[in-house]
Amino acid sequence: IGMGLNLEVNHVAFASDRKFDGFQHRRLTPAEFGQIAGRAGRYLTDGTFGVTGRTPPFDQDLVERIESHDFEPLQVLQWRNSDLDFTSPEDLVAALEETPRQPGLTRAPHGADRLALDAALRDAEIKARLKSREDLERLWSVCSVPDYRKIAPANHAELVISIYKHLSDDGTIPEEWFGAQVGFSDRVDGDIDTLSNRIAHIRTWTFVANRPDWLKDPEYWRETTRALEDRLSDALHERLTQRFVDRRTSVLMRRLQETEHLEARVEPSGELHVEDHFVGTLEGLSFRPDGEAGSEQAKAVRSAAQRVLAKTLAERAEALAAAPDTAFRLDQSGVIAWNSAPVGRLERSDDMLLPRVQIIADDQLSGQPLDKALARLQAWSDTQARTLIKPLFDLREADGLEGIARGIAFQIVEGFGILPRQDAADDLKALDQPVRAKLRQLGVRFGAYNVFVPALLKPAPRTLLAQLFAITSGTQPDLLSDILALSASGRTSVPVKPDLTEAHYRSVGYRVCGQMAVRVDILERLADIIRPLIAWRDGTTPRPDGAEPGNAFSGTVEMTSLVGCAGDDFASILKALGYRSETVKRAPAAPQEEPAVEPESTASEPTAVSPEAEAAETVADPSEVEPAGAAADVAPAPVEVDPPVAAEATEAAVEIASPPVEIALSATPEVAAGTATEPVPAEAVSETSPSPSDENVEMTDAAVVEVAEATENAAADPEAAELVEVVIWRPRGPDRRPQRGPRREQGEARPDRKPNRQRPAEGKGRGKRRGGKPEHGPGPQGGRKPDPRPPREPVIDPDSPFAALAALKEKMRGDS
């Protein structure tokens, strides 16, 4: 009020009866009480006054004097001599120091003009300019410029001196300088203090502009400074009103008392207006009050909002219930958004695939509108789940799956579409071809390391499955954010984080392999690359890139590009998959010529077949594949993932029962011709993934012969290049003890020896082995015991593309 805020005040309450008057703290005088209390009331309306709880009540005599405006007259008046002598600066100072001669008057204290004069007379340059009476009169008139700014006496004196120098030099103030001083205040932004300072500055220049002879165009500057002062005053009034007067609260409280019906309006952005006043924002089905309202204002805002919220929220709930599916979205934190506002949250339920929806709404929403909104959100959530992860529902609700097949389908559903092969190794062996075909029709892929549903590896279903996993497992929000970021990245492999478990990675379609987590479909494609390299035999087909003699391979750019890592990271993946590394020295590989193709092959010569066909011939019966034990993975069967047709063909190769195949463990035909060969079951040498064993397992005899021969040949050739170290990888072979005795020469038969350990027989008439070589004994079969069971006829899935491959193989055998 003291700053000029013009309001219709009905009551003035004194929070204190004391003030600091610039010299001392003292109690207000009755006249000062009356001046402040008189702000209450306007025209025909009488105002009232009183005190707050912190101030003692006024005595009755003071109250009567304020109400009747009966104040004691002043006893003393301040006086300063107005008859000034401008003969010299000393005479002017003496005239100002003259004391009053009449009683009741006292000399006034030095004002701003006298302080500015004293400062100017101390300036030698200014004193040198005072050469006439007119110069002294001009100086005194400049000193009379009011100090509206109230910064400091010295600061005001500097302004006075600057103005006087301009007037004494040119007779007028330069308009460029004056306009620059006015421009410093030509802004209406800022808070109350900033605007008050600008008004004080512009009032100083308004006073200067009103002097008739200080400017060349005083009329123009008079209008300019007055207009600027008006704008600043209006801005200050607005800031004072915003700070000290809450019109919104006044209107809302008055309307709440006058009527029960309030007009409410919701903007498209969610802003809620009551009686054209903003009271807060609607976010979905929740109300967020205006955060800028103070405690008293917030009470009025809440009261007005509560009056209209029940109806407004009910209308929004009806709109939500009628909204199409495209209006909803599920974010990564499991919150359902409607028109970008949160309205529901997924929570755990009895059905792991169909979570329960918890609605996010204020208490004002109840009854039928609430039920309809909740039912709509639950229906949308169920539809999303049945659409995005439909293969899991198909597996769970499939007809014709019984026994073990039903159990495998249940495990796939529980694993959210991924079942590690070693977790169901025995059950997978027991599946026959018709059942496998049924599972394949339901979208299941039998991979070398996992049984999974490829359609669920896409980003949308994988994100939902990760959220379902987080809900069922109670995963912390920060960990959920990490795995969802991993799912959205699209990377084929990532470094393993210590705070994420294997289950976390599996929920987004990755499998932990050493220090890396690799996407499960990428692992199957890696197996597809390695499989023909291990199955390659020297002398049958041209050597593929990366193939090494003796069921080995070396890393290629194709492999590292596929998994997205190299070096130690890639090595940790291969080790986790059951391969062991060896470093061998050999001469750099020379360019190989294409072998001449014979027009006809004799019966004694091996028939050249494709690596896929050869791998199919040497694949073991999946029923004989043993699990990896406690620390290693299951020996994977060859399974193609991409493209699907090749996957089915290779997968069928795993499932077809093949009789044991005898393979000579020799590096060259010459060694094979002069050495007694040992019959080895196909599962011991033809599986693309290694069987479990220790890292320091001994190389096979064929590998020893091949590496030795390569070294000897390189040393014997005088033109051989310098040997280089090459890292090769082999499947982990059976656990064998180091060979004792002298090394056998080329062509010498292997002496018989006892097996490493005896295993108890399992089943009827047949032992079940987890690795190693069969016992040796006399006879043409090298000690192999006859199997009393008749060979099992393979049942080939007629829908599998491998049926054509098997027919082609039989035809080639007949031709040979």
Image (spheres, rainbow, N blue to C red):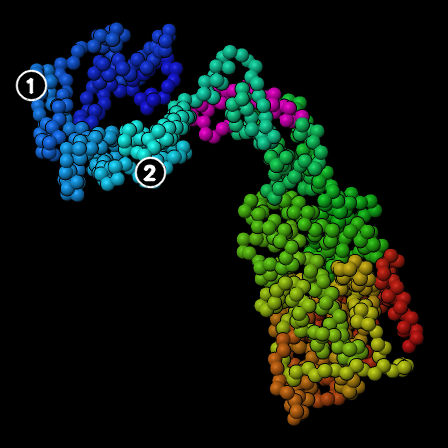
Q: Earlier in the sequence, mark 1 or mark 2?
A: 1
Mark 1 residue element: loop
Q: Position of residue 250 (x, y in %)?
A: 45, 18
Q: Mark 2: which amino acid?
A: Glu
Q: Is residue 18 above or below residue 433?
A: above
In the image, is residue 213 part of the stretch drawn in magenta? no
Q: Which residue is mark 1?
A: 101
Left or right position of 205 against 161: right
Q: Residues within 10 Å of mark 1 (few under 14, many from 20)?
A: few
Closest to the observer: 131 or 503?
131
Q: Is residue 339 left or right of residue 146?
A: right
Instruction: Name the residue rendered at 66%, 91% in the picture.
Output: 719
- Tell me the residue that label 2 is attached to: 175
Q: Position of residue 189 (x, y in %)?
A: 41, 34
Q: Which mark is residue 52?
A: none
Main secondary structure found in the magenta portion? helix
Q: Quadrant of residue 574?
A: bottom right
Look at label 1 and name its amino acid.
Arg
Label 2 element class: helix
Viewer-closest of 107 and 409:
107
Regarding residue 347, the answer to whether it shows in the image is no
Q: Which residues are magenta?
A: 289-318
Mark 2: few, some, or many residues within 10 Å (few <14, many ≥20)? some
**For discs 1 and 2, the disc positioned in front in the rendered view:** 2
Q: Position of residue 272 (x, y in %)?
A: 56, 26
Asked where in the image residue 624 lies, by quadrant, the reply is bottom right
Please provide percent x and percent y for residue 478: 54, 47
Question: Residue drawn 13% across and 23% down?
Answer: 83
Query: Residue drawn at (68%, 68%), measured in percent from left and top?
Result: 558
Q: Nearer the viewer, residue 397 or 649?
A: 649
Reply yes or no: does residue 294 show up in magenta: yes
- Judging depth in this view, the residue of 755 and 19 nearest the camera is 19
